[in-house]
Amino acid sequence: KSVPDPEASTYDNITRQTMFNIINSIEKKAKNPLNMMKKEKTPLAFVSCAEAGWPDVPFGDVVDNIAPAWLKSYLKAKRAVEGRLGSSSAIRPVVMRPSLIWSWD
């Protein structure tokens, strides 16, 4: 029966900041002189979101314009993580974009 702190439990803190901390740690380890001889990138999986609302897909801008505020925050956090993963030279990103995750449970 915990109650999330509305200030701390944001999509930005939970999704973006957590993944950025992981990415920063991997990049820091890769820059360690003991690890610099290794040319292998660290694989890192991230469950993102479906393409709805992405600017480069059909009607993406429409979804972005009509989405409620919580969905815009969610998409912004997910897009930021994907962008950061794609720009890292130390990480081999694995990005999954499921269209729906659902269960009767």
Image: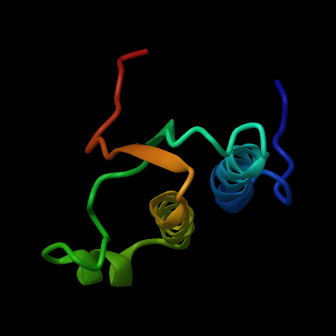
Q: Residue furthest top?
A: 105
28 horizontally vs 97: left or right: right
**Residue 54 quadrant:** bottom left
Q: Residue furthest front?
A: 37
Q: Which residue lies at the image location 30% right of the left edge and 53% below the top edge? A: 50
Q: Residue furthest left?
A: 58
Q: Which residue lies at the image location 23% right of the left edge and 77% below the top edge? A: 56
Is residue 61 placed above or below 94 in the rendered structure? below
How many numbered marks have been drawn onto this rendered protein structure?
A: 0
Q: Position of residue 84 (x, y in %)?
A: 55, 64
20 horizontally vs 32: left or right: left
Q: Quadrant of the C terminus?
A: top left
Q: Which residue lies at the image location 67% right of the left edge and 45% below the top edge? A: 36
Q: How is the image coloured?
A: rainbow
Pick whichever, 33 or 77, lies toward us. 33
Q: Position of residue 16 (x, y in %)?
A: 64, 58
Q: Position of residue 103 (x, y in %)?
A: 36, 21
Is residue 84 placed above or below 4 in the rendered structure? below
Is residue 103 placed above or below 55 in the rendered structure? above
**Residue 94 quadrant:** top left
65 horizontally vs 7: left or right: left
Pick whichever, 28 or 81, lies toward us. 28
Q: Quadrant of the N terminus?
A: top right
Q: Which residue lies at the image location 40% right of the left edge and 73% below the top edge? A: 67
Pick whichever, 52 or 67, lies toward us. 52
61 horizontally vs 105: left or right: left
Q: Position of residue 20 (x, y in %)?
A: 68, 55
Is residue 1 placed above or below 45 in the rendered structure? above
